[in-house]
Image (tube, grey):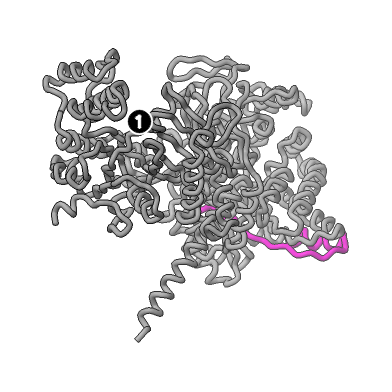
């Protein structure tokens, strides 16, 4: 009984479980059930392997006896999830000096000696842990045996049972090693993940007839399109043979060279039939490892065919359209984050990387360009048709035009919700932030210096990988995005099952067009301040800020009004009647002013004012803590003319859209509220502006007023605020900042240390803190809806595109989430997967309840 528990022969009826023996063991059992020619295989469960790692031994002699004829063996890893990896496969176990002579009579002396040499080297390095360099000059098995004895002071084991026992124990210990544990945890494996081991009868793959090793799959790994790919090598034993010198054949008939189809047409046809069978029976596109031994076909293994994100989508959609899997299953097979790779160019996976710095992956995608250190330089180079990477200490509002002109953005400071990160995601521009520990930026000298001492000057070419958060030297090869028919089909399926609204944060008409292209359900956040940074508008905005009287201020605002109105009208046209939520001006006024000496001098020239006066005015607007100063609703109450102008522009655009047949009810959002009276004051002025526009235009229209909840007090007093508004939208970026007492621009300096030491499980700006911040959201939602049952609830921070945040919002009864336009597909897929999982769970519960009621 003990021996049976230690290992199990894989058969069609054996008790093989993924959770006990690993995914590879279960896959082999499925191949056996499909009557494929799989060599005899013994599976060691996780518990046995753990005991081996702890120093116990199993009866390897008894294990050997389960194989008839004492064949050569291989040992393969079998983790619960194949992608978690494991120690490398070891072949030809059982080969000894005596058995080499017998093998030579079958396959020839040279081939037998080659196999023995490879086994000795593999055993020496992987089991005995010897340095491979010690065997570098050994060209024969006899020479390798002598080196082994010299290095270990003992003879190479000549007993198959001893060899097998040592291999099993070595592979078990390798799995438990620190490096292996960290590597698989990086792939998502739990710390206590188990490993199974498979002992399989060797198919030698060498002999006097047609022998060799090959791999075949029936889809393209990059595109997912149907097609036979792979190779076959004569007299080869493993994947390593495909990269070694030898006769490598195409599989399918090919004009470029000989193929397996030409040489062995029957075996090739059998492989194609087996591929079709695995696709329908295993409901997956598989990569099959096979061998020929004197023309006889054997299947060694099958695994999920490797695939890019683009191929992943195409394969899932094709399987569903062929009725191999359901549409729901196709949706569940795609990780939401994989979609970001289809929306942006990416650094080619096989590109040889020369990394110069590592930071925070703030906005996905790959970009190559020449280094520039100012927004003006970025715009100038872009105007000449050049590609650039904008490099800054950190970005501010005045850098937006430069960010829009650049191919990518790199900052020394900042975190996942810093200005650079948020704007870059909205623009769809690759961005790496918070790289201060890796590099030093010197804008005046126009150079950046890496920690290793490398120096890069303006005009030098670098590449950003915003998906991985790294900076590369030189120009990398990029893979273009893949929004093909399969992607569009998947999005249609996702939208059909999603039960929570997915809107986009869109600040300009260009952003709105991107949101519309991704079929967003509306605009959940339009940050109007980003409409003022075009050069002509910025000048007028600065004139308004510098106005000495209410009359002069109003004159400047009267010039801004038609600009705002035109933007809002274009938003309404683009969204074609879908909801558009517009946040009134939020940032402090100093953000519209230049920060450097050169910028102040330029402003003085533009406004025809003395430099001293402009410098004094800029200094006077500065605040010790501007994010908690005169911004948001405080600005709107202190200088009410600003919000009056914006409200009037919104309503005039609404009336104009109505005349063009576009019926919309704009949603106006008041920022940074913390008291009911703030809402009352702004609400009254907005109502007056609406009434005035209705009278002047003769057009009736509706609108909704709401609040973006960004302060803890607004969440705590949500009940009394809800009496005056139609919606509450939780701005989780600022709310997280205030709840934690963290600066989202500076937290990147220490956040990785906090996460590594377990202070925070994850960066709270990257993944919403559902315990602390989440509790405040639930409290605000409950109090708001207690006061007004039809209150619309949403989140509009960058957390809105995260699957965990969407799950939280669905459970809390929120109406929608809003995220940057390029995260809309990811958010929609995540929402669809959650809806499908909930529906399946409900069905299981219902079935269980029905079973309980059966008499």
Would residue 385 be seen by someone viewing this image from the given angle?
yes
Horizontal and vertical percent for residue 309? 54, 42
Would residue 766 be seen by someone viewing this image from the given angle?
no
User: Can you say which quadrant of the picture contains the C terminus?
Assistant: bottom left
Please tell me which residue lies in front, 430 or 221: 221
Please tell me which residue lies in front, 511 or 518: 518
Task: Examine the image and state in which quarter residue 457 appears.
Answer: top right
Check the image and report above or below for 258 versus 713: above
Range of residues picked out in magenta: 687-712
Horizontal and vertical percent for residue 749? 43, 33
Task: Examine the image and state in which quarter residue 437 appears.
Answer: top left
User: Can you say which quadrant of the picture contains the N terminus?
Assistant: bottom left
Q: Residue furthest top?
A: 137
Residue 660 as seen in the image, left or right of residue 483: right
Residue 579 as seen in the image, left or right of residue 716: right
**Does residue 528 show up magenta in the picture?**
no
Tally the numbered discs.
1
Instruction: Tell me the element at label 1.
Output: loop
Horizontal and vertical percent for residue 616? 65, 29
The residue tagged 1 is 206
Check the image and report above or below for 507 versus 830: above
Horizontal and vertical percent for residue 804? 47, 54
For label 1, count other residues whose C-alpha is less than 10 Å away and answer few (under 14), some (14-19) or many (20+): many
Task: Examine the image and state in which quarter residue 728 appears.
Answer: bottom right
Residue 662 as seen in the image, left or right of residue 615: right
Q: Residue at x 72, y 27 (%)?
A: 603
**Does residue 701 show up magenta in the picture?**
yes
Q: Residue at x 64, y 25 (%)?
A: 388
């Amino acid at each position: 009984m003990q021996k049976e528990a230690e290992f199990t022969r894989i058969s069609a009826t054996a008790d093989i479980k993924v959770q006990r023996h690993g995914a590879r063991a279960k896959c082999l059992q499925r191949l056996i059930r499909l009557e494929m020619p799989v060599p005899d295989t013994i599976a060691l469960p996780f518990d046995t392997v753990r005991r081996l790692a702890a120093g116990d031994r199993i009866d390897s002699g008894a294990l050997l006896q389960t194989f008839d004829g004492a064949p050569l063996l291989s040992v393969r890893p079998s983790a619960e999830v194949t992608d978690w990896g494991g120690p490398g496969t070891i072949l030809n176990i059982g080969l000894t000096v005596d058995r080499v002579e017998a093998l030579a009579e079958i396959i020839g002396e040279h081939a037998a000696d080659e196999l023995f040499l490879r086994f000795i080297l593999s055993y020496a390095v992987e089991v005995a842990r010897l340095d491979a360099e010690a065997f570098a000059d050994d060209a024969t098995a006899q020479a390798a045996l002598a080196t082994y004895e010299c290095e270990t002071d003992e003879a190479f084991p000549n007993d198959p049972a001893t060899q097998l026992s040592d291999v099993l124990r070595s592979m078990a210990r390798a799995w438990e090693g620190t490096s292996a544990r960290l590597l698989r945890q990086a792939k998502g494996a739990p710390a206590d993940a188990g490993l199974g081991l498979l002992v399989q009868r060797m198919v030698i793959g060498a002999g006097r007839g047609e022998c060799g090793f090959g791999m075949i799959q029936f889809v393209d790994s990059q595109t997912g399109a149907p097609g036979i790919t792979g190779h076959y090598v004569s007299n080869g034993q493993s994947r390593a043979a495909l990269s070694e010198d030898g006769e490598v054949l195409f599989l399918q008939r090919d004009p470029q060279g000989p193929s397996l189809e030409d040489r062995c047409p029957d075996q090739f046809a059998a492989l194609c039939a087996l591929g079709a069978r695995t696709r329908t029976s295993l409901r997956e596109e598989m990569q099959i490892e096979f061998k020929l031994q004197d023309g006889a076909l054997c299947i060694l293994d099958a695994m999920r065919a490797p695939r890019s994100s683009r191929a992943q989508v195409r394969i899932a959609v094709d399987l569903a359209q062929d009725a191999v899997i359901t549409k729901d299953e196709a949706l569940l097979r795609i990780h939401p984050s994989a979609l970001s790779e289809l929306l942006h160019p990416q650094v080619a996976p096989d590109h040889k990387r020369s990394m110069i710095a590592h930071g925070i992956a703030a906005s996905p995608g790959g970009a190559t360009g020449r280094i520039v250190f100012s927004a003006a330089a970025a715009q100038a180079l872009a105007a000449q048709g050049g590609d650039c990477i904008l490099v800054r200490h950190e970005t501010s509002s005045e850098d937006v035009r430069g960010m829009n002109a650049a191919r990518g953005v790199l900052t020394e400071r900042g975190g996942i919700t810093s200005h650079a990160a948020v704007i870059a995601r909205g623009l769809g521009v690759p961005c790496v932030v918070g790289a201060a520990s890796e590099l030093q930026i010197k804008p005046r000298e126009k150079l950046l210096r890496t920690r290793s001492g490398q120096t890069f000057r303006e005009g030098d070419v670098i590449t950003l990988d915003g998906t991985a958060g790294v900076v590369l030297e030189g120009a990398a090869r990029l893979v273009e995005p893949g929004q093909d028919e399969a992607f569009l089909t998947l999005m249609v399926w996702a939208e059909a099952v999603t039960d929570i609204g997915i809107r986009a944060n869109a600040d300009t008409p260009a952003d709105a067009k991107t949101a519309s292209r991704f079929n967003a359900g509306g605009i959940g956040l339009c940050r109007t301040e980003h409409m003022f940074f075009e050069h002509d508008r910025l000048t007028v905005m600065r004139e308004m800020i510098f106005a000495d009287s209410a009359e002069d201020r109003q004159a400047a605002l009267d010039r801004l009004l038609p600009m705002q109105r035109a933007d809002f009208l274009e938003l309404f046209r683009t969204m074609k009647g879908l909801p558009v939520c517009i946040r009134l001006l939020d940032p402090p006024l100093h953000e519209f002013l230049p920060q450097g000496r050169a910028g102040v001098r330029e402003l003085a020239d533009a406004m025809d004012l003395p430099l001293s006066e402009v410098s004094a005015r800029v200094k006077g607007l500065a605040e010790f803590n501007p994010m908690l100063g005169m911004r948001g609703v405080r600005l709107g109450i202190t200088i009410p003319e600003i919000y009056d102008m914006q409200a009037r522009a919104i309503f005039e655009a609404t009336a104009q859209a109505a005349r063009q047949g576009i019926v919309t009810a704009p949603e106006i959002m008041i920022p940074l509220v913390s008291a009911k009276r703030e809402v009352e004051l702004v609400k009254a002025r907005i109502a007056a502006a609406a009434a005035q526009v209705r009278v002047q235009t003769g057009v009736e229209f509706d609108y909704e007023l709401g609040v973006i909840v960004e302060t803890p007090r607004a969440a705590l007093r949500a009940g009394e605020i809800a009496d005056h508004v139609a919606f509450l939208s939780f701005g989780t970026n600022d709310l997280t900042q205030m709840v934690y007492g963290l600066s989202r621009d500076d937290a990147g300096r220490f956040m990785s240390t906090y996460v590594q030491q377990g202070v925070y499980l994850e960066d709270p700006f990257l993944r919403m803190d559902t315990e602390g911040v989440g509790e405040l959201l639930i409290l605000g939602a409950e109090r708001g809806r207690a006061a007004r049952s039809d209150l619309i609830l949403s989140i509009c921070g960058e957390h809105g595109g995260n699957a965990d945040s969407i799950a939280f919002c669905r459970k809390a009864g929120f109406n929608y989430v809003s995220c940057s336009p390029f995260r809309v597909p990811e958010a929609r897929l995540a929402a669809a997967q959650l809806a499908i999982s909930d529906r399946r769970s409900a069905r299981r519960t219902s079935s269980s309840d029905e079973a309980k009621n059966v008499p």
